[in-house]
Image: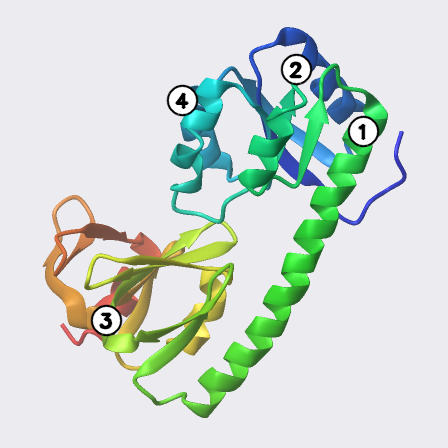
Amino acid sequence: MLKKSMRIVNAIVIENESGTAQILNKFGEDNSLILNIIETVEDITHSLELIKLHKPELIFLHASSENLKNLKQITDLDFNTPKFIFMSDEPQKAYDAFKCNAVDFLLKPLDFNTIIISIYKVIKTIEMEISFQNQKLQQIDSINSKHRNNEYIAVASIDKIELLKIEDIIFCKAEGKYTEFILTNGIKILSSRNLGEYSSILSDNFFFRIHHSYIINIKHVVKISKKEGFYCEFSNGMTLPIAKRRQEEFIKFIKL
Protein backbone atom coordinates (compact mmCIF):
# COMPACT_ATOMS: atom_id res chain seq x y z
CA MET A 1 0.00 0.00 0.00
CA LEU A 2 1.12 3.56 -0.73
CA LYS A 3 1.18 6.37 1.80
CA LYS A 4 -1.68 8.83 1.75
CA SER A 5 -1.41 11.24 -1.18
CA MET A 6 -2.76 14.74 -1.57
CA ARG A 7 -4.75 13.82 -4.68
CA ILE A 8 -6.56 10.91 -6.27
CA VAL A 9 -6.06 10.49 -10.01
CA ASN A 10 -9.22 9.40 -11.86
CA ALA A 11 -8.34 7.02 -14.69
CA ILE A 12 -9.83 4.92 -17.48
CA VAL A 13 -8.06 1.79 -18.72
CA ILE A 14 -8.15 1.03 -22.46
CA GLU A 15 -6.86 -2.52 -22.67
CA ASN A 16 -8.08 -5.72 -24.37
CA GLU A 17 -5.74 -8.11 -22.54
CA SER A 18 -7.51 -9.35 -19.42
CA GLY A 19 -4.28 -10.05 -17.53
CA THR A 20 -3.01 -6.48 -17.87
CA ALA A 21 -6.43 -5.04 -17.02
CA GLN A 22 -6.59 -7.23 -13.89
CA ILE A 23 -3.16 -6.04 -12.73
CA LEU A 24 -4.18 -2.37 -13.10
CA ASN A 25 -7.52 -2.87 -11.37
CA LYS A 26 -5.82 -4.73 -8.51
CA PHE A 27 -3.32 -1.87 -8.22
CA GLY A 28 -6.23 0.60 -8.10
CA GLU A 29 -7.95 -1.40 -5.35
CA ASP A 30 -4.76 -1.60 -3.27
CA ASN A 31 -3.86 2.06 -3.79
CA SER A 32 -7.22 3.80 -3.78
CA LEU A 33 -5.70 6.86 -2.05
CA ILE A 34 -3.91 7.84 -5.26
CA LEU A 35 -5.75 6.06 -8.08
CA ASN A 36 -9.42 5.59 -8.93
CA ILE A 37 -9.97 3.40 -11.98
CA ILE A 38 -13.40 4.37 -13.29
CA GLU A 39 -13.76 1.59 -15.84
CA THR A 40 -11.89 -0.68 -18.24
CA VAL A 41 -12.77 -0.86 -21.95
CA GLU A 42 -11.24 -2.78 -24.84
CA ASP A 43 -10.46 0.01 -27.31
CA ILE A 44 -10.67 3.75 -27.93
CA THR A 45 -13.91 3.54 -29.91
CA HIS A 46 -15.71 2.05 -26.90
CA SER A 47 -14.12 4.57 -24.52
CA LEU A 48 -15.29 7.88 -26.01
CA GLU A 49 -18.67 8.17 -24.27
CA LEU A 50 -17.09 7.21 -20.93
CA ILE A 51 -14.34 9.80 -21.40
CA LYS A 52 -16.89 12.51 -22.27
CA LEU A 53 -18.92 11.61 -19.18
CA HIS A 54 -16.17 11.23 -16.57
CA LYS A 55 -13.38 13.47 -17.99
CA PRO A 56 -10.56 11.39 -16.50
CA GLU A 57 -7.19 12.90 -15.66
CA LEU A 58 -5.36 9.77 -16.82
CA ILE A 59 -5.77 7.06 -19.47
CA PHE A 60 -3.84 3.79 -19.41
CA LEU A 61 -3.67 2.96 -23.11
CA HIS A 62 -2.74 -0.32 -24.79
CA ALA A 63 -0.47 0.90 -27.59
CA SER A 64 -2.02 -1.25 -30.31
CA SER A 65 -1.90 -0.07 -33.92
CA GLU A 66 -5.68 0.43 -33.86
CA ASN A 67 -5.60 2.54 -30.68
CA LEU A 68 -2.71 4.66 -31.95
CA LYS A 69 -4.61 5.24 -35.21
CA ASN A 70 -7.69 6.41 -33.27
CA LEU A 71 -5.91 8.43 -30.57
CA LYS A 72 -6.95 11.74 -32.17
CA GLN A 73 -10.58 10.92 -31.32
CA ILE A 74 -9.69 11.46 -27.65
CA THR A 75 -7.49 14.52 -28.11
CA ASP A 76 -10.22 16.17 -30.21
CA LEU A 77 -12.81 15.96 -27.41
CA ASP A 78 -14.06 19.27 -25.93
CA PHE A 79 -12.18 19.17 -22.63
CA ASN A 80 -8.63 19.23 -21.38
CA THR A 81 -6.76 16.22 -22.76
CA PRO A 82 -6.00 13.59 -20.10
CA LYS A 83 -2.50 12.34 -19.35
CA PHE A 84 -1.52 9.08 -21.05
CA ILE A 85 0.46 6.07 -19.87
CA PHE A 86 1.04 3.79 -22.85
CA MET A 87 1.48 0.03 -22.38
CA SER A 88 2.86 -2.65 -24.69
CA ASP A 89 4.94 -5.83 -24.77
CA GLU A 90 6.88 -4.28 -27.67
CA PRO A 91 9.70 -1.98 -26.42
CA GLN A 92 9.74 -0.09 -29.74
CA LYS A 93 6.23 1.20 -28.98
CA ALA A 94 7.86 3.54 -26.44
CA TYR A 95 8.83 5.75 -29.39
CA ASP A 96 5.15 6.10 -30.38
CA ALA A 97 4.23 6.80 -26.74
CA PHE A 98 6.59 9.71 -26.24
CA LYS A 99 5.91 11.02 -29.73
CA CYS A 100 2.27 11.32 -28.55
CA ASN A 101 3.37 13.20 -25.39
CA ALA A 102 2.72 10.27 -23.05
CA VAL A 103 3.77 10.86 -19.45
CA ASP A 104 5.25 7.36 -19.35
CA PHE A 105 5.53 3.99 -21.10
CA LEU A 106 5.07 0.66 -19.32
CA LEU A 107 6.51 -2.55 -20.74
CA LYS A 108 4.32 -5.61 -20.27
CA PRO A 109 4.01 -7.70 -18.20
CA LEU A 110 3.31 -4.88 -15.74
CA ASP A 111 4.58 -4.86 -12.18
CA PHE A 112 3.44 -2.73 -9.24
CA ASN A 113 6.74 -0.87 -8.83
CA THR A 114 6.76 0.52 -12.37
CA ILE A 115 3.05 1.42 -12.09
CA ILE A 116 3.78 3.35 -8.87
CA ILE A 117 6.57 5.32 -10.55
CA SER A 118 4.30 6.15 -13.52
CA ILE A 119 1.44 7.30 -11.28
CA TYR A 120 3.73 9.65 -9.38
CA LYS A 121 4.99 11.06 -12.68
CA VAL A 122 1.36 11.80 -13.60
CA ILE A 123 0.68 13.40 -10.20
CA LYS A 124 3.80 15.55 -10.49
CA THR A 125 2.82 16.64 -14.01
CA ILE A 126 -0.72 17.54 -12.92
CA GLU A 127 0.52 19.50 -9.89
CA MET A 128 3.01 21.42 -12.03
CA GLU A 129 0.20 22.33 -14.44
CA ILE A 130 -2.03 23.45 -11.56
CA SER A 131 0.79 25.64 -10.23
CA PHE A 132 1.25 27.16 -13.69
CA GLN A 133 -2.51 27.69 -14.05
CA ASN A 134 -2.66 29.43 -10.66
CA GLN A 135 0.00 31.87 -11.85
CA LYS A 136 -2.04 32.51 -15.01
CA LEU A 137 -5.21 33.02 -12.97
CA GLN A 138 -3.47 35.69 -10.91
CA GLN A 139 -2.46 37.42 -14.14
CA ILE A 140 -6.01 37.16 -15.45
CA ASP A 141 -7.55 38.50 -12.23
CA SER A 142 -5.21 41.47 -12.55
CA ILE A 143 -6.20 42.02 -16.21
CA ASN A 144 -9.93 41.70 -15.50
CA SER A 145 -9.84 43.97 -12.45
CA LYS A 146 -8.16 46.71 -14.50
CA HIS A 147 -10.66 46.33 -17.32
CA ARG A 148 -13.82 45.49 -15.37
CA ASN A 149 -15.95 47.74 -17.57
CA ASN A 150 -14.01 47.05 -20.74
CA GLU A 151 -15.29 45.14 -23.75
CA TYR A 152 -12.92 42.18 -23.30
CA ILE A 153 -12.50 39.37 -20.77
CA ALA A 154 -9.33 37.35 -20.19
CA VAL A 155 -9.95 33.58 -20.04
CA ALA A 156 -7.44 30.93 -18.98
CA SER A 157 -7.34 27.72 -20.99
CA ILE A 158 -4.97 24.82 -20.30
CA ASP A 159 -2.06 26.25 -22.27
CA LYS A 160 -2.76 29.94 -22.96
CA ILE A 161 -4.71 33.06 -22.07
CA GLU A 162 -7.54 33.99 -24.46
CA LEU A 163 -8.79 37.59 -24.72
CA LEU A 164 -12.48 37.33 -25.64
CA LYS A 165 -14.73 40.15 -26.78
CA ILE A 166 -17.63 40.14 -24.30
CA GLU A 167 -20.26 40.87 -26.95
CA ASP A 168 -19.15 37.73 -28.84
CA ILE A 169 -20.05 35.44 -25.90
CA ILE A 170 -23.44 33.77 -26.48
CA PHE A 171 -23.36 31.75 -23.26
CA CYS A 172 -21.06 29.97 -20.82
CA LYS A 173 -21.60 26.33 -19.91
CA ALA A 174 -20.37 24.43 -16.85
CA GLU A 175 -18.21 21.43 -17.76
CA GLY A 176 -17.43 19.93 -14.36
CA LYS A 177 -14.72 22.10 -12.83
CA TYR A 178 -14.22 23.86 -16.19
CA THR A 179 -16.27 26.41 -18.16
CA GLU A 180 -16.97 26.32 -21.89
CA PHE A 181 -17.52 29.63 -23.72
CA ILE A 182 -19.75 29.43 -26.81
CA LEU A 183 -18.96 32.30 -29.21
CA THR A 184 -20.80 33.88 -32.14
CA ASN A 185 -18.22 32.57 -34.65
CA GLY A 186 -18.98 28.97 -33.60
CA ILE A 187 -15.72 28.56 -31.68
CA LYS A 188 -15.79 26.96 -28.22
CA ILE A 189 -13.19 27.98 -25.62
CA LEU A 190 -12.65 25.76 -22.57
CA SER A 191 -11.55 27.67 -19.47
CA SER A 192 -9.77 26.11 -16.48
CA ARG A 193 -12.03 28.08 -14.08
CA ASN A 194 -15.46 26.94 -12.90
CA LEU A 195 -18.70 28.65 -13.88
CA GLY A 196 -19.27 30.15 -10.43
CA GLU A 197 -16.16 32.31 -10.77
CA TYR A 198 -17.55 33.85 -13.96
CA SER A 199 -20.83 34.83 -12.25
CA SER A 200 -19.07 37.79 -10.64
CA ILE A 201 -16.71 38.52 -13.54
CA LEU A 202 -19.63 38.78 -15.98
CA SER A 203 -21.92 40.62 -13.56
CA ASP A 204 -22.96 43.44 -15.88
CA ASN A 205 -26.36 44.34 -17.36
CA PHE A 206 -26.37 41.66 -20.06
CA PHE A 207 -25.37 38.38 -18.39
CA PHE A 208 -27.67 36.22 -16.29
CA ARG A 209 -27.28 32.76 -14.75
CA ILE A 210 -30.43 30.99 -15.93
CA HIS A 211 -29.40 27.58 -14.59
CA HIS A 212 -26.65 26.11 -12.40
CA SER A 213 -24.98 25.05 -15.67
CA TYR A 214 -25.44 28.20 -17.80
CA ILE A 215 -24.69 31.93 -17.82
CA ILE A 216 -26.21 33.62 -20.87
CA ASN A 217 -25.73 36.89 -22.72
CA ILE A 218 -29.28 38.24 -23.17
CA LYS A 219 -28.14 40.24 -26.21
CA HIS A 220 -28.10 36.94 -28.11
CA VAL A 221 -31.53 35.71 -26.97
CA VAL A 222 -33.92 35.80 -29.94
CA LYS A 223 -36.90 34.01 -28.39
CA ILE A 224 -38.21 32.90 -24.99
CA SER A 225 -40.48 29.86 -25.04
CA LYS A 226 -42.94 29.27 -22.21
CA LYS A 227 -44.28 25.89 -23.36
CA GLU A 228 -43.60 23.10 -20.85
CA GLY A 229 -41.16 25.29 -18.94
CA PHE A 230 -39.09 28.34 -19.86
CA TYR A 231 -36.44 28.12 -22.59
CA CYS A 232 -34.14 30.65 -24.28
CA GLU A 233 -33.42 30.38 -27.99
CA PHE A 234 -30.20 32.01 -29.18
CA SER A 235 -28.89 33.60 -32.34
CA ASN A 236 -26.89 30.43 -33.12
CA GLY A 237 -30.08 28.29 -33.02
CA MET A 238 -29.33 26.63 -29.68
CA THR A 239 -31.95 26.37 -26.93
CA LEU A 240 -31.28 26.29 -23.17
CA PRO A 241 -33.62 25.72 -20.20
CA ILE A 242 -34.27 28.34 -17.52
CA ALA A 243 -34.32 26.73 -14.08
CA LYS A 244 -37.74 26.97 -12.42
CA ARG A 245 -36.38 28.73 -9.33
CA ARG A 246 -34.69 31.39 -11.54
CA GLN A 247 -37.64 32.13 -13.84
CA GLU A 248 -39.19 34.96 -11.83
CA GLU A 249 -35.85 36.70 -11.32
CA PHE A 250 -35.03 36.25 -15.02
CA ILE A 251 -38.32 37.88 -16.09
CA LYS A 252 -37.53 40.87 -13.87
CA PHE A 253 -33.97 40.97 -15.24
CA ILE A 254 -35.07 41.24 -18.86
CA LYS A 255 -37.94 43.58 -17.80
CA LEU A 256 -40.74 41.55 -19.38
**Disc nearest the viewer among 3 and 4:** 4
Element on which disc 3 rests? helix
In terms of sequence position, does the residue under pointer 1 or pointer 2 come before the other?
A: 2
The three-letter code of the residue at mark 1 reads Thr
- Observer-side mark, 1 or 4, equals 1
The residue type indicated by label 4 comes to Thr
Q: Which residue is mark 1?
A: 114
Question: Which quadrant holds residue 116?
Answer: top right
Pick the quarter of the image with the C terminus: bottom left
Q: CA distance from mark 3 to mark 1?
A: 48 Å
N-term mark: 3 or 2: 2
Q: Are marks 1 and 2 in contact (CB under 8 Å)?
A: no
Q: Secondary structure at mark 4?
A: helix
Contact (CB < 8 A) between labels 2 and 4? no
N-terminal of the two: label 2 or label 4?
Answer: 2
Q: Residues within 10 Å of mark 4 (few under 14, many from 20)?
A: some
At label 3, the amino acid type is Asp
Tell me, for residue 21, which label it has, or none. Answer: 2
Residue sitting at x 43%, y 36%: 74
Q: Earlier in the sequence, mark 1 or mark 4?
A: 4
Q: Counting residues from the N terminus, which is met first, the one under dot 3 or under dot 4?
A: 4
C-alpha distance separating marks 3 and 4: 35 Å
Residue ID at (70%, 19%): 25
**Residue highlighted by disc 3:** 168
Q: Residues within 10 Å of mark 1 (few under 14, many from 20)?
A: few
Q: Hey, which residue is sitting farthest left in the picture?
A: 223
User: Of tags 3 and 1, which is closer to the observer?
Assistant: 1
Q: CA distance from mark 1 to mark 2?
A: 15 Å
Q: Residue at x 61, y 9 (%)?
A: 17
> Could you tell which of marks 3 and 1 lies nearer the N-terminus?
1
